[in-house]
Image: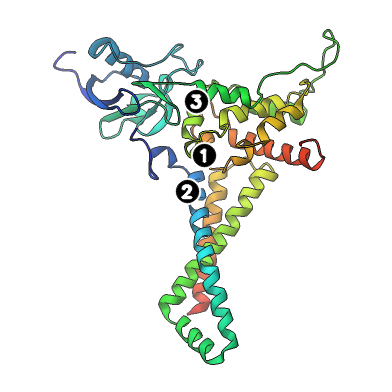
Amino acid sequence: MTSQERTFQVDIWRGDENGEYQPFEVPERENQTVLDVVTYIQRHLDPALAYRFACRVGVCGSCAMTVNGRPRWTCRTHVSRVVKNGKLTIAPLTNLPVIRDLVTDMTPFFEKWRDARGRFVAGDGPKNELAPVEPESNERAAASEAIECINCGVCYSACDVVSWRDDYLGPAALNRAWAAWNDVRDGDRTGILKAVSQGTGCHTCHTHQSCAEHCPVALNPTFSIAGLKRASLKAKLKGQLR
Amino acid sequence: MSISGLTRASRAHPGFVAALIHRLSGLALAIFLPLHFLMLGLALDEAAFSGAVAWSNQPLVKISEALMVSALAVHFAGGLRLLAVEFLGLTRAQGAWIAGCFAFGGGVGILFLMRAF
């Protein structure tokens, strides 16, 4: 860093849940992303800083953090867009256990994907038989709107209901379950509704729409969850859920 | 961690504001309703009821009533919006729908005030 360079202050969370913010001075760069800032600090100012990233281009979903109070994908967030009064505050995602510094333990997040039964279950048909999926069908259109999730955890961190009830399945897992339920090839679609409608599943959502507001890839988990509510209600009325 | 609280930045969006107003208006209505029924109960005693009616004719009480009517209208409209989201798949322009609910609540309150004075 030369003396002519313009710098700005970055406060970074250090330690575990009981840690504190540590200030750093970071030089301004053109087209600088928040991930660039964190990487600069780790490479030039404090090599002990723990953070997580992989692709740097918004595909892997590894680098989500809380930036000035909002959960964001840091690799696609330009500093110029989020800096406030010449300052950045970067913390780990909320609603997840903090391992160290900016790294959270994503285990509960992915366990809920499993619990919401978001995986494909093959049906009974012969393996060499192609299942027809009409491109214009309602199910295919609904599935198209719910796929492309990058598992970054931003919606999970933004969700008020998760912050109130840590056993709530959360928007990402339920969004995945909605995409899976709309896959007409699935051999146990009722099983998905059973998984998401019991306990603290889809009916726990309060429709605040924070997940949709913050999703970096513009998905709308709130409406996926509303779809699951409707589908499970219909299944319940038909006596398919017990 | 210190990223919490009602005013945290991640909550600064129409959906959260709508949810907050919906709960607060619901709470206000829940507190108001027993008092409302209590006053209706006074109708059995003419003198007491006349006193209550005279009390409710004060400007500040009328303004409070307008606020309650607004709360009822915004709660009603907000509830319909939520039902439309959940049962009719209303997915687009949520900010505009939420603004419409607030405008409806405010408008009904203003109409009430215009008739009250």
Name the subunit of mark 1. Answer: A
Image location (x, y in percent) of residue A36? 34, 16
Tag 1 and tag 3 share a subunit: yes
Say which residue label 2 marks: B17
Q: Which of the two discs, 1 and 3, sits closer to the camera?
A: 1
The answer to whether marks 3 and 2 mark residues whose Cβ atoms lie closer than 8 Å is: no
Name the subunit of mark 3. Answer: A
User: In this rendering, would B27 be left or right of A117?
Assistant: left
Tell me which amino acid carries mark 3. Gly
Tell me which amino acid carries mark 1. Val
* Quadrant of the image occupied by residue A230: top right
Image location (x, y in percent) of residue A229? 68, 39
Say which residue label 3 marks: A153
Image location (x, y in percent) of residue A42? 29, 13
Tell me which amino acid carries mark 2. Val
Front in this rendered view, residue A117 or A12:
A117
User: In this rendering, would A47 be left or right of A123?
Assistant: left
Tag 1 and tag 2 share a subunit: no
The answer to whether marks 1 and 3 mark residues whose Cβ atoms lie closer than 8 Å is: no
Which dot marks residue A161?
A: 1
